[in-house]
Image (spheres, rainbow, N blue to C red):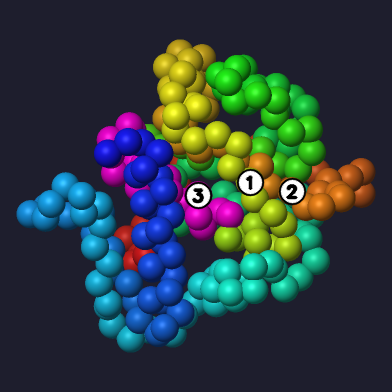
Amino acid sequence: MAAATRVAAGAAVLAVRLAMAAAGFRPVTTLLPKGLPRSVVAVVRRGPVATPTRVERALFTAVLAGRGTRPPAPVAAVRGLLRSAADAEGVRLCTAVTPEERARLHITIPPRVGAIPEEGIVALLGTDHDAPVGGLQAGQALQRVLWTATALGLAGTVLAGPVELAGARNSIRQRGAFGVVPQVLVHVGAPGRLTGPEDPPDRDRSHCRLPRRSGDPR
């Protein structure tokens, strides 16, 4: 299965998980289940009855409405929330907002990707390995990041996927820029304005952090 297909399948898996959670059941997910045809990339089973979490309710509401229920959030707050969304799926999210961060990111991206937007947040979703399960995890993280942006009143756009980023895999490792296998490059912004001089600076300098390795059910 192609890398881009695995990412798309992962996004669909999260949609099933969120629908099940919103219905009041805890989803139990198995990626690349053994003993089934290779075309089956995931199995989502209905787990015990459980009240949806606040995050699940917010995401489900945003999905149904097609937009958030609040004014666009400032960049300083959004960066951490987007990283937390990726963390929940065991994927790293490296964000770039300042010109220096964008330049650092740009040297690791193949020319075919094109220009990186000068406003908003540019974020690279990456995994610790290039195994097939990594694409499925990246797809779930991508969908959660995009839905989180929607819930925050922002808009998320995919700038490049695994095919466009294929040439960046070795370069990132050689340069040590982020230390991840790149999966998807996204942009998060809002119509008109996302950042501005009155926004407080982001004091968190670990723009690419390791995801939490908790055993919490997804």
State the extent of the magenta-drawn residues as a range.
Answer: 129-146
Left or right of residue 55: residue 114? right
Q: Secondary structure at mark 1?
A: strand
Mark nearer the N terminus (3 vs 1): 3
Residue 188, how many percent across, how many down? Answer: 68, 47
Inter-mark Cα distance, 2 to 1: 8 Å
Q: Nearer the viewer, residue 205 or 138?
A: 138
Residue at image position (65%, 61%) is 150
Rendering coords of residue 113 (x, y %): 60, 25
Q: Which amino acid type corresponds to the residue marked 3 in the rendered image?
A: Leu
Query: Rounded to the nearest whole Å, what is the CA distance between mark 3 and mark 1?
Result: 10 Å
Q: Is residue 174 visible?
A: yes
User: Which is more foreground, mark 3 or mark 1?
Assistant: 1
Residue under label 2: 189
Magenta span: predominant SS is helix
Q: Label 1 near label 2: C-beta < 8 Å?
A: yes
Residue matched to label 1? 157
Q: Amino acid at mark 2?
A: Gly
Q: To which residue does mark 3 refer?
A: 142
- Residue at 73% x, 63% y is 153
Look at the numbered discs 3 and 2 and tell me whether their residues touch, using CB distance below 8 Å.
no
**What is the quadrant of the N terminus in the image?**
top left
The image quadrant that residue 16 belongs to is bottom left
Q: Is residue 216 magenta?
A: no
The answer to whether residue 211 is above or below residue 67 is above
Q: Is residue 133 magenta?
A: yes
- SS category of the residue bearing label 3: helix
Residue at 51% across, 57% down: 144
Q: Crowdedness of circle 3 by 10 Å Cα count: few (<14), some, many (20+)?
A: many
Residue 132 x, y percent position in the rendering = 28, 39
